[in-house]
Image: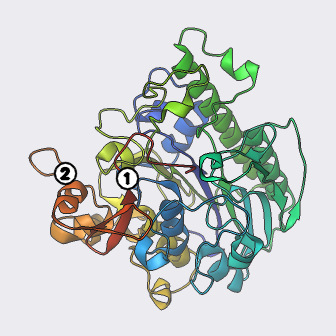
Amino acid sequence: MMTTKRPNFIVVYCDDLGYGDLGCYGSTEMKTPHLDQLAGEGMRFTKWYSNSPVCSPSRASLLTGRYPARAGVSHILGGKRGTAGLPLGLPTLPKVLKSEGYRTALFGKWHLGASAEYGPNAHGFDEFYGFRAGCIDYYSHIFYWEQAGGVNPVHDLWHNEQEVWENGQYMTEVITKKSVEYIEASAEDEPFFLYTAYNAPHYPMHAPKPYIDRFPELSPDRRIMAAMIAAVDDGIGDIVAALKRKGIYENTVIFFSSDNGPSTESRNWLDGTEDLYYGGSAGIFRGHKGSLFDGGVREPAILSYPSFIAAGQTRDEVCAMMDIFPTFLELAGCSPEAYDPNGTSLVPLLGGDGAAEEARHIGGAGAAGANGAAAGSDGVPGAARTAERASEEDGTGRTAVRTGQSVWSSRGSRNCCRSG
């Protein structure tokens, strides 16, 4: 039964993680014991969808509870310093929870505006340690990936609005370290919202040798993927251990997922290979990052809240990233409706309400509106089928695909994502 004490909230968001690359989602190659345990102690979802097959719109929906179009982010945002991002007037999870007395922090990837004006601190985070662009070198923390467009490489590591230098430190481990320190420093009478946003397993494909050495039997592309995911999994273990040491694990809501499906971009290779990249797996699903098939938008998703969610559950209801905003607000004792979200609170579902399925995004236009990927009898996702009927240029040369009220930006090619 849920306690009367307001819970802490943690969102752990990966980058380009495939549906088929966790042990608890059927992988026999990836070793993810900590995530598998988290799923066993909470609720694992089999039909959880991102609101976008690429990064920035997915994160906008997660933090605002709105379709990407209503959140003002319908495509991948650039990494050049000064780039605008998530509109400042929108309610966000950190902003609303902060107004309710929560401490708020983000450690890791932002990608919703590459300037202080549109950075995490401007959107409600008390503390930020990480990078603003879509990806960085894991050791130098330099953003390299828009040189073809005339953008020079730029260092991208910040503590709030102050540039900091941690040359040689592996970014996944830095994110874990900052998250653990934040938990350990938390006050008992002050709840927190922590957004732990790993850039793994997004390119460049970097991992320390000890992680790579765990997987000698795998092919080179799968080995580096497994190593990067293992580093994240170890981080999950450290975060949960810190919560248990503080005695707050039972009263902490943890949501784990990824922004979109695995990348097949050839630049994932580091040996000059020009072929599609095969390191990530969407499991049994067709599609990948940038695709509106399920492989691009159907994500692993785990919710843990030991004092409220019964352990060992697997749920097949259709859910979406934008559902987290109203869910967290309701659990915090707030009224989600006051902020006009498009998502639906999952609290009845989490609490075991058998009628909750009726409120989910199932059937007809509702399914496309929520996740845009409900497949028809021919195996073609609803989003793709809708895209065949209605699309329009968004002014940047990309096609803004309208599914219900949502907008997903897709270029439809293997190199569809410049830095997401």
**Residue at (68, 14) in percent of width and height:** 213
Q: Is residue 360 visible?
A: no
Q: Amino acid at mark 2?
A: Ala
Q: Residue 379, percent across and down?
A: 15, 44
Locate residue 136: give its quadrant: top right
In front of the other: 219 or 389: 389
Does 311 sit left or right of 176 as displayed?
Answer: left
Q: Amino acid at mark 1?
A: Arg
Q: Residue 187, percent across and down?
A: 84, 68
Locate residue 106: give its quadrant: bottom right
Residue under pointer 1 = 411
In front of the other: 322 or 250: 322
Judge depth for marks 1 and 2 and give the one in front.
Answer: 1
Q: CA distance from mark 1 to mark 2?
A: 20 Å
**SS under mark 2:** loop
Task: Give the crowd class for mark 1: few <14, some 14-19, many >=20 residues within 10 Å.
Answer: some
Does 213 sit left or right of 155 as displayed?
Answer: left
**SS under mark 1:** loop
Q: Residue 26, percent across and down?
A: 40, 29
**Residue at (51, 72) in percent of width and height:** 325
Of callouts 1 and 2, the N-terminal one: 2
Q: Residue 190, percent across and down?
A: 78, 74
Does 376 sit left or right of 263 as displayed?
Answer: left
- Which numbered dot is residue 324? none
**Residue at (66, 74) in percent of width and height:** 94
Relative to residue 206, is residue 41 depicted above or below?
below
Residue under pointer 2 = 375
Q: Is residue 367 visible?
A: yes
Locate residue 349: give its quadrant: bottom left
